[in-house]
Image (cartoon, rainbow, N blue to C red):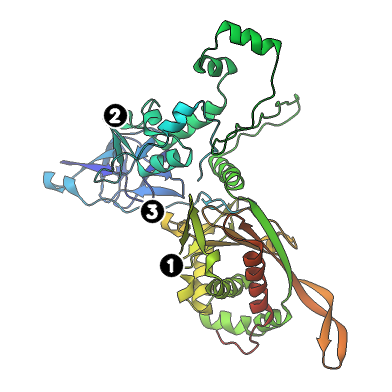
Amino acid sequence: MAKYQLLLPKMGESVAEATVIKWLKKPGDYIEADDAVMEIATDKVDSEVPSPVAGRLVEQRCKEDEVVQVGSVIAVIETDEPEQAASAPQPVIASQPTPVASPAPQASAAPASPQPQSIPGTEQLAQRTQAPAPQSSNGEFKSGSRFYSPLVKHIAQQENISIAELEHIPGSGAEGRLTKDDLLGYIRNKGNAPAAAQQAAAPQTAPAQQQSAQAKPTPPEAPKAGTPRSEPVKPAFSATGVDEIIEMDRMRRLIADHMVMSKHTSPHVTSFVEADVTGLVLWREKIKNSFEKREGEKITFTPIFIEAVVKAIKDYPMVNVSVNGTQIIKKAAINISMATALPNGNLIVPVIKKAEELNLLGITKAVNSLANKARTGKLQPDDVKDGTFTITNVGTFGNVMGTPIINQPQVAILAVGAIKKKPAVIETPQGDVIAIRHMMFLSLSYDHRVVDGALGGTFLSRIAYYLENWDADKEV
């Protein structure tokens, strides 16, 4: 009999580790080929790990809630094959019905770092400007005898944590390796350190200087340029005996962190327009039955909105960018993230890749496919990454408008409100008339670091223009 080592498979280019949620098989169980062995969670989606071979599970190499690196041995399976078969190919990741949101604004899309805390001194600030550690052949970063995954390295860079500081953080991974949870826990605890510990870490002041400071208190100096501000003091928590305290689940914690990070990162500005979409509504009503009969699926308003956004981005490509320090990265592809409601009330943000290459039929099929995969938990990590612009439909919940939060690292997000029948003034050659029209509000939140009011406002108006001037004879 051969013993096959089951490895944690690769789940996307940006995914370096996963958390074991639940073992579906226990030692002694017989496993058929392609049977799911465990459930895992990444910072993108939740999935199942299947076994590529049939055999009996003899050893579990990791525990539930443990963070495991991609490529690590997670189980040993005893097979009936000869010894050579122990080197069977790496399993392919399968899906399971609990996707984790790439947080959508007002909810997603998708894992984020907590905000940086105050920096204890200028010496640490100098340390944090050190050059990054050399990268190894497997994509991890090495400093001394320690390796750091790309995800850990990215979080450290976002939080201004130097390699020297990383070296002193205890790791719970294999051979003491620092995991994402280790680093996030360190960042959270750093901001909650007792005042006495912070005072002990600060340079000691001479007794005479201390007495002078006590005798004549001075107002605090304004922070110097480039020095991060301290986190505001949080209000005291209070709960009575009848209050229900609900611990956030992992998805909600990711959403919360991502939303706070976005508001700290980008100065948000929101612009609004009202669009008359009567022609669009009548066109869809005319073709929806024949479309469903021909294609076997429905056409909703979402692909229509996406097509209008893609056209507007082609006209104003500087909305399809991201920011890296003082650099503006202009994206080559238009990848539209669409906020999708899940049965549990959370949102996830799958991405339509290269939407500029699709016609309305192609966009419709992509929208329906991703929405169905989201509802049934079959999204893969690559389905929720690399978005460049997000659309969220607040009209789904009966809202007429909203002020969405930017889905970082994007710089703009469109919220579409509910379509309502309203009296509106229509200009005709014979004069103005009042008629019942299908009206809707569009709101665009954008990053004022790189998108000025003129660009944001004209871009939003261009989207409304494409919706209002919909071709009544358009074929799809």
Tell me the mark number nearer the camera, choosing from 3 and 2: 2
**Disc 3 to disc 2, how far (Cα)?**
28 Å
User: Residue 58: image x %, image y %?
Assistant: 26, 35
Query: In this image, 39 relative to 279: left or right?
Result: left
Measure the C-alpha gap from mark 2 to mark 1.
41 Å
Kindly tell me whether residue 418 is visible in this rendering.
no
Dot 3 falls on a residue whose secondary structure is: strand
Does residue 234 sit above or below 274 in this rendering? above
Mark 2 vs 1, N-terminal side: 2
Q: Position of residue 225 (x, y in %)?
A: 56, 38
User: For mark 2, what is the residue?
Assistant: 175
Whole-number angstrom distance, CA of label 3 to CA of label 1: 30 Å
Q: Quadrant of the N terminus?
A: top left
Q: Residue at x 50, y 64 (%)?
A: 370
Q: Nearer the viewer, residue 419 or 162?
A: 162
Foreground: disc 3 or disc 1: 1
Q: Horizontal placement of 325 versus 257: left or right? A: left
Label 1: state its secondary structure.
loop
Can you tell which of label 2 and label 1 is closer to the viewer?
1
Of 276 and 124, nearer the camera is 124
Q: Decide: marks 3, 1 in contact (CB < 8 A)?
A: no
Query: Amino acid type of disc 2?
Result: Glu
Residue type, label 3: Ala
Picture disc at residue 94: 3
Question: Which residue sits at x=52%, y=30%?
Answer: 119
Q: Is residue 239 visible?
A: yes
SS type, badge 2: helix
From the image, tell me which residue sits under label 1: 332
